[in-house]
Image (cartoon, coloured by chain):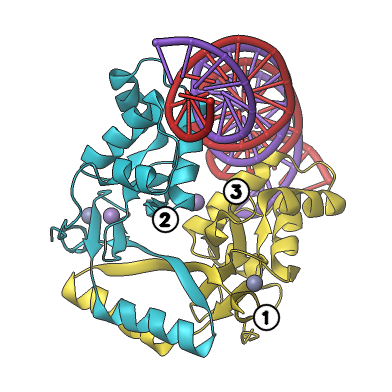
Chain colours: A cyan, B yellow, C red, D purple
Amino acid sequence: MPLPKTEMPGRLQAHFRERGIRMTQQRRAILQVMETASKHLDAAQLLRKAQKLDASVDRSTVYRTLQLLKRHGLIDELDLMHIHGEGHYYERKLNRDHIHMACLRCGKIMEFVSDIFENLKGQVAKDCRFRIVVSRLEIGGYCAACSK
Amino acid sequence: MPLPKTEMPGRLQAHFRERGIRMTQQRRAILQVMETASKHLDAAQLLRKAQKLDASVDRSTVYRTLQLLKRHGLIDELDLMHIHGEGHYYERKLNRDHIHMACLRCGKIMEFVSDIFENLKGQVAKDCRFRIVVSRLEIGGYCAACSK
DNA sequence: GATCCTGTTGCAACTGGTCGCAATCGCCAT
DNA sequence: ATGGCGATTGCGACCAGTTGCAACAGGATC
Ligand SMILES: [Mn+2]
Ligand SMILES: [Mn+2]
Ligand SMILES: [Zn+2]
Ligand SMILES: [Zn+2]
């Protein structure tokens, strides 16, 4: 179930320039990694990969940059049901929201795009008069293979 | 938007007895707090409240008991969009799942029960052949008052 | 009630994430 | 190109959550 990737690589750096956010050596490395990551990196992985591009990148800079990206709505933060520990996972926000499913037995992560999800957000916005900025639906359970 | 509370107080301790889980002084205190909590406690609050009932309760016991309750599906773990820091929040699982909305400006937490949410879970279960055990929808945005 | 066995606990060490601070570095104006 | 200012960084200290371990306490059995 691959998702459509309509965003171009290099888009994150472009966003920074457009919005007048200062670009640094370290941020360049971190953004680079986020851009090219296939999926769902945690902070430690991101740090290791970024340090390969710029050895000076520090743990705290990674966390600060993640916060920055979150604040600007450029990435999503996920728990993935905390299947692999306490930490959080990050992925670039694409144009279409998607649901995450995590198999509690084999640990597989699945993604799913649904119109009903869009309807549901519409209902929340309307019935609760709530202006939605970010949403996150995570489901834990057993995948087809593990259910058998 | 108050939710129906159909579970009786003392239900958590009953669950433990039914399932043959050992009951200890410390667990009694922690469960007591979870039972009577109005809402959304974080680990630190839970620890403080539990220690008022049994001063010997240790941090690690609180975390271990939370894991136990999670594993048995008796509580839900929430991020509440990390509005107040990194930590997690906990609440007793009631019979009806509900959505959490967090206002990014005033910090208010709202809850919402929706049939569309149930439909959506049905669709995921069917289309992805995924047996859902736990689900969590959290939304961040601006409440009616703060949108104005 | 005493005994036993196993699950649970407190503690202390460790890990991962945060924060305040002084040094540094982007970036804009000259 | 240079200078200056404020934003950003690395660092170290800190705090929250986890884990291994030896002591302890449920509760089942007699
Ligand atoms: Mn994803
Ligand atoms: Mn979380
Ligand atoms: Zn599986
Ligand atoms: Zn508000």
Q: Amino acid at mark 2?
A: Gly
Establish if A7 lies above or below B122: above
Q: Chain under label 1? A: B
Picture coordinates of residue A97, whole percent (x, y)? 30, 66
Query: Mark 1–mark 2 contact, CB under 8 Å?
Result: no
Q: Secondary structure at mark 1?
A: loop
Residue at numbered disc 3: B87
Residue at numbered disc 1: B8
Q: Is residue A97 left or right of residue A67?
A: left
Q: From the viewer's side, name the closer residue of C12 and B40.
A: B40
CA gap, disc 1 and disc 2: 41 Å
Q: Secondary structure at mark 2?
A: loop
Give the quadrant of the C terminus of chain B.
bottom right
Q: Amino acid at mark 1?
A: Met
- Residue at position x 49%, y 64% from top? B73
Establish if C20 lies above or below A129: above
Q: Secondary structure at mark 3?
A: loop
Picture coordinates of residue C1, whole percent (x, y)? 84, 46
Residue at numbered disc 2: A73
Q: Does label 2 lie on the same chain as label 3? A: no
Dot 3, crowdedness within 10 Å: few (<14), some or many (≥20)?
some
Q: Is residue A38 left or right of residue B80?
A: left
Picture coordinates of residue B120, whole percent (x, y)? 31, 80
CA gap, disc 1 and disc 3: 28 Å
Give the quarter of the image for residue A100. bottom left
- Residue at position x 26%, y 46% from top? A11
